[in-house]
Amino acid sequence: MSHPRRTARLIAVSMVALALAACGSTEDDGPKAEPADDSALYAAAREEGKVVVYMNVTPDVVEAVSEGFEATYPGVEVEAVRLPDAEMIPRLETELSSGAPTADFVENASPNWLIEQGKTGAWVAADQSPQATGEGDYDTEAFFDAEHNIYELGGTVNTFAWNTDLVPDGIEDYTDLLDQDLAGGKLGVLELASAPGNDFYIWLKETFGDDFLDDLGAQEPRIYPSTTGIVEALGSGEIYAANWVVPSLVEQAKEAGAPIDYGISPTGKFGIRAYGVVNAKAANPNAAQLFLEYLLSEDGQATTWPLASSVLDPAPGTALGTNEQLPPWDPEASTPDKLAAAREAWDAIFR
């Protein structure tokens, strides 16, 4: 890694300074410059007419973002493909290596992969976007990796939840999941099967103590491979509580009549950061930059990260906080060897 101190943010201060200088500056003792007019970028994007984007956020959010962008920038159509990272990455690798048509803009939650691709020049800087060049509210010093041209966009918030009929008093913190009333298959846990899951269990152990995972395993919980399965099990009463949900999915289930709810730990907040890149092989490069401009705007953040985490401070809309509040991302925590060892250790506790 070329950034040994990279934690939650992908920081390259010196390159950011060059990018800002290229976009203009104000006098030292003068007022801060207003964000640049994006009309030139918009005009160029309208000439292209569309933008192809790959995103891993939930389908309803992909639809809302597409509609929000097209309402803000009429004349530029969004062709959105929603894929989880496990499907998106091999597809992109094939497209990038073969020269096949591919996405103009990519959003996912796999920073290690994005960095490796960035080293080959796969991504380019959004040098015409006012937000992406630091002329808006987006903090490029904190959230832009100028070496690899990667923009931190926001993130999910993952937390605990319960069935309100079966646990009428609710749950205040993760430690409540150790209550004996939840033992014997009444508790659901997320399987440690990927880097985000490993990050989550590392965070639980660091936040609630070395014995917390052993105590959680002693509850003999049911194991689920996905958030969707956990939410369904909570709603049906198959389980009383769970250690991992996405608030937006819980709210959708509640609207459909499911007796479930979630809480946010007063001890700390866990989430998975999301990143965006402009493809160097984009067929619609201006529209790709304009799409990033929208995602980094207040409206774009509120639309993309409802009940989640924003890179803007204060967080707009219904966002539950900012990326500054999420635990640091450690690129070395889930290398292939470490992830395999973590899965083995987790299985020994929970299976």
Image (cartoon, rainbow, N blue to C red):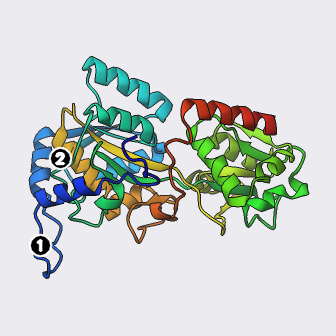
Q: Which mark is residue 75?
A: 2
Residue 145 location (% of width, % of height): 32, 49
Q: Which mark is residue 243?
A: none
Residues marked 2 and 1 touching at CB (< 8 Å) = no
Label 2 secondary element: loop
Q: Which mark is residue 26?
A: 1
Local packing at callout 2 (Cα closer than 10 Å; few below 14, some 14-19, many 20+) is some
Quadrant of residue 276 in the image? top left
Please give the name of the residue rendered at 30% of the width and 62% of the height, measured from the top-left corner: 138
Q: Indicate the secondary structure of the residue bearing disc 1.
A: loop
Q: Tell me what residue is drawn at x 11 percent, y 56 percent.
A: 22
Q: Position of residue 174 (x, y in %)?
A: 73, 59
Q: Quadrant of the C terminus?
A: top right
Callout 2 amino acid: Gly
Determine whether 173 is above or below 83 in the image. below
Nearer-N-terminus badge (2/1): 1
The x, y position of residue 74, in whole percent, is 20, 51
